[in-house]
Amino acid sequence: MNPVVKVVQPSGILDGTKAGQFRQEIANLVDSGVDMVLVDFQDVTFMDSSGLGALVLALKTVRAAGGKLFICSVNEQIKMLFELTSMDRVFEIFANREEFENAIVSTH
């Protein structure tokens, strides 16, 4: 049985104004029975602590439902934020969507 993988692709600035919408999108995916969520940061230019908080809550939501959450395509600012907050140890981060698919989808 193939896992159900959904990609969430926020864009622009992931901050307090978009955090609620982002969390809701993740909750909807979990409710629909998704096994894996890939958050693709390709179009995100900046993320602040509110965006990071939303990401942590999204991770908890997905894990609580028995799923997995992955991240790919982070820019330098987001990478630095993850490293400063040690979130790079919490999240599984891939360079891009292709790397994710090669590492995760092909092994399941």
Image: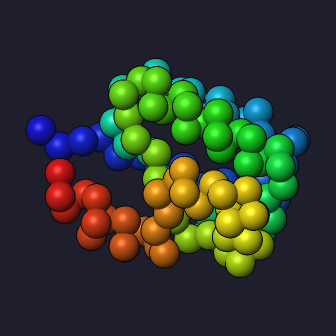
34 sits left or right of 12 in the view: left
Q: Measured along the vertical axis of the image, is residue 66 above or below residue 45?
A: above
Q: Residue at x 48, y 32 (%)?
A: 62
Of residues 7 and 72, the one drawn nearer to the viewer in this rendering: 72
Return the x and y of residue 104 as percentages of the image width and height. 28, 59
Of residues 28 and 80, the one drawn nearer to the viewer in this rendering: 80
Image-quadrant location for residue 78:
bottom right
Q: Measured along the vertical axis of the image, is residue 51 above or below residue 72?
A: above
Q: Measured along the vertical axis of the image, is residue 10 above or below residue 43?
A: above
**Which residue extends farthest right?**
17
Of residues 49 and 22, the one drawn nearer to the viewer in this rendering: 49
Return the x and y of residue 18 as percentages of the image width and height. 80, 43
93 sits left or right of 105 in the view: right
Of residues 93 and 11, the one drawn nearer to the viewer in this rendering: 93
Q: Residue at x 68, y 75 (%)?
A: 75
13 sits left or right of 32 in the view: right
Residue 11 visible to the viewer: no
